Image (cartoon, helix red, strand yellow):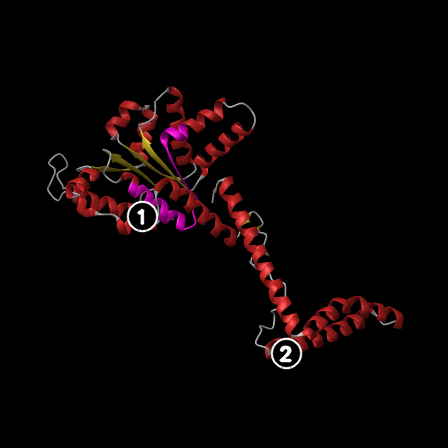
């Protein structure tokens, strides 16, 4: 999962805060039990002193190490049994005084070797959704709230089907793509058509579902993405260059990149090269991409290089949007 450095840092900070809250809760419970059952505090003190005391006694009496350890084990078990009985009598869990980690899977490290533990992964997932929400208004946008009744049921002759029928197919395709992200029928989608037909809305729906599955998702506009590639190339050494390198690496390595509004940028030879790098690198690495644009495939061929057009035509499922601008439909309906 190629979460950004910022997302991981925020996730790790929240994990540390949760771990501290867990320790504070354990300490508060320990103080409560000690106040109610003073003998449990005495037992804890005895347990901490048992090992050095018995080992010292073994040395004085000339006992061998095995005998000393057996005596230590017997005394410890007797003390633990007494403490457990006291706790149970007052309705506490028998391990209420134990120092236990918040996450036993990773012992509160957040990582199991090079792999992120699910405790940290869950927090990174939540932080990612927060970031996406600030860009895509994920609070309102979901497949369940997508309105097909805004699309005309009359057949549009250039397409030989109605906008409503077309959107039913697109909605089903996008939903399947998100819900079966592990093995979608098509790895990449090209959402194209005039403004105001739902491309960004459906991109947000995909982002929400894929994020909730625990995958790393990056959404950004074409203009912003290409600006970061430009900063990577021309920024001087320092924080700006480091951040630009991190941003472009995230675009290239995240599980799902949603590149919005392709064609709105000022297209230069540098932009052409950056777009090809994004598309080709992600194809080679087997990463999934969703691109939205007001341009259709003929428009893509006119505006971008043959290499870019070839990859979009051959490796992306093109989903053309058509119909009346939804904003106008809403306005007409009052």
Mark 1 highlights which residue?
A: 140
Residue 286 part of the magenta segment: no
| Image point (49%, 22%), residue name | 234
Q: Which circle marks residue 96 in the picture?
A: none
Residue 286, compared with residue 22, is above or below; it is above
Mark 2 highlights which residue?
A: 85
User: In this view of the protein, which residue sits in the foreground, 294 or 282?
Assistant: 294
1 or 2: tag closer to the N-terminus = 2
- Magenta residues, as a range? 201-226
Q: Characterize the local packing of mark 2: few (<14), some (14-19) or many (20 or more) Cα atoms within 10 angstroms.
A: some
Measure the alpha-carbon separation of dots 1 and 2. Answer: 53 Å
Q: In this view, does 30 lie to the left or right of 73?
A: left
- Where residue 29 sits, quadrant-wise, is bottom right
Q: In this view, does 84 lie to the left or right of 67?
A: left
Q: Characterize the local packing of mark 1: few (<14), some (14-19) or many (20 or more) Cα atoms within 10 angstroms.
A: some
Quadrant occupied by the C terminus: top left
Mark closer to the observer (1, 2): 1
Q: In this view, does 94 lie to the left or right of 123?
A: right
| Image point (34%, 50%), residue name | 179
- Where residue 278 sits, quadrant-wise, is top left
Q: Give percent across and percent down for residue 143.
A: 28, 49
Q: Give percent across and percent down for residue 205.
A: 32, 46
What SS does tag 2 mark? helix
Is most of the magenta stretch helix, strand or loop? helix
Q: In this view, does 63 lie to the left or right of 116?
A: right
User: In this view of the protein, which residue sits in the foreground, 83 or 188?
Assistant: 83
What SS does tag 1 mark? loop
């Amino acid at each position: 999962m190629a979460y950004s450095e910022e997302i991981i840092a925020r996730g790790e900070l929240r994990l540390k805060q949760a771990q501290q809250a867990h320790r504070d809760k354990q300490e508060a419970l320990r103080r409560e039990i000690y106040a109610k059952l003073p003998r449990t505090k005495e037992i804890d003190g005895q347990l901490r002193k048992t090992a050095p005391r018995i080992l010292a006694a073994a040395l004085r009496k000339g006992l061998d190490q095995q005998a000393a350890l057996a005596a230590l084990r017997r005394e410890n078990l007797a003390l633990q049994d007494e403490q457990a009985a006291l706790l149970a009598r007052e309705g506490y869990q028998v391990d209420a005084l134990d120092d236990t980690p918040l996450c036993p899977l990773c012992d509160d490290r957040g990582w199991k070797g090079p792999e992120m533990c699910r405790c940290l992964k869950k927090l990174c997932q939540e932080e990612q959704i927060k970031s996406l929400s600030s860009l895509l208004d994920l609070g309102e946008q979901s497949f369940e709230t997508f309105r097909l009744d805004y699309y005309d049921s009359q057949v549009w002759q250039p397409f030989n089907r109605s906008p409503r029928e077309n959107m039913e197919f697109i909605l089903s395709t996008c939903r399947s793509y998100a819900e079966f992200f592990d093995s979608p029928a098509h790895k990449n989608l090209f959402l194209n058509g005039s403004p105001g037909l739902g491309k960004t809305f459906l991109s947000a729906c995909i982002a929400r579902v894929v994020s909730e599955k625990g995958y790393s998702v990056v959404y950004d506009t074409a203009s912003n993405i290409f600006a970061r590639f430009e900063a990577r190339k021309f920024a001087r050494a320092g924080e700006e260059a480091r951040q630009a390198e991190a941003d472009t690496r995230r675009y290239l390595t995240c599980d799902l990149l949603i590149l919005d509004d392709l064609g709105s940028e000022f297209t230069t030879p540098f932009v052409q090269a950056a777009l090809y790098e994004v598309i080709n690198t992600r194809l080679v690495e087997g990463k999934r991409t969703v691109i939205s644009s007001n341009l259709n495939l003929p428009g893509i061929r006119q505006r971008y290089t043959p290499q870019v057009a070839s990859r979009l035509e051959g490796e992306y499922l093109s989903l053309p949007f058509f119909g009346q601008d939804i904003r106008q439909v809403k306005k007409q309906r009052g």
